[in-house]
Image (cartoon, helix red, strand yellow):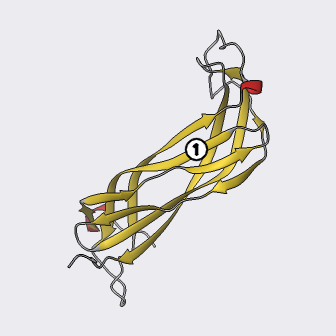
Amino acid sequence: MSIAAQNMIECDFVVVSEDYSRYILQDGTILKVKIVVKKIFRSAETSPEGYPIAISLDSTNAVAAIVPPSEKGKPSKEPWDPRRDIGKEIKFEPYEEKWQEYVTNDGFKILVKPVVVKVLKYDKRNKYGEPIYAANVQAITNVEKFTSTAT
């Protein structure tokens, strides 16, 4: 169902938790991934249970790697070009997938979990001598009604 942009309400929010999820790559690298939420929008219309019909996030993916010394080398002289350089798919296993949590000013808890679906490893290296990795990250979201536990 498509919700027109004019029917969406921007919500102010507080970040409760925004820790990294971690994945172990076949080469021993630990890939750290989180979704940095910048804006939250919800539909004005709600379900009979009181949940927004739609949620929209303005976000960016933050990806970092902890690379074992055996995988490091000299930095590449040529910069990495994602339009030209060809990566090789590398296998990985989830190590720790964490829900990120945000509470909106109008009483909803927005839960977001980054899930990595593909990782490419490139022959080129960054300024630290680490292989360059590109991750395809999908966001899973859930909405709960927020009730304060403060007394």
Position in image of residue 64 (x %, y %): 56, 37
Residue drawn where x is 75% and y is 38% of the image: 28
Position in image of residue 126 (x %, y %): 61, 21
Crowd class of label 1 (few under 14; some 14 to 19; many from 20; radius 10 Å):
some
State the image quarter where residue 41 is shown. bottom left
Q: Quadrant of the C terminus?
A: bottom left
Front one among 79 and 132: 132
Please determine whether, in this image, residue 12 is positioned above or below residue 20.
Answer: below
Q: Residue furthest bottom?
A: 48
State the image quarter where residue 88 is shown. top right
Identify the secondary structure beneath mark 1.
Answer: strand
Front one among 97 and 151: 151
Front one among 104 and 80: 104
Q: Residue furthest front?
A: 151
Amino acid on which disc 1 is placed = Lys
- Check disc 1 and report the residue beneath it: 32
Position in image of residue 78 (x %, y %): 64, 12
Residue drawn where x is 63% and y is 35% of the image: 66
Residue drawn where x is 27% and y is 60% of the image: 13
Q: Residue furthest left?
A: 151
Please determine whether, in this image, residue 111 is positioned above or below residue 32.
Answer: below
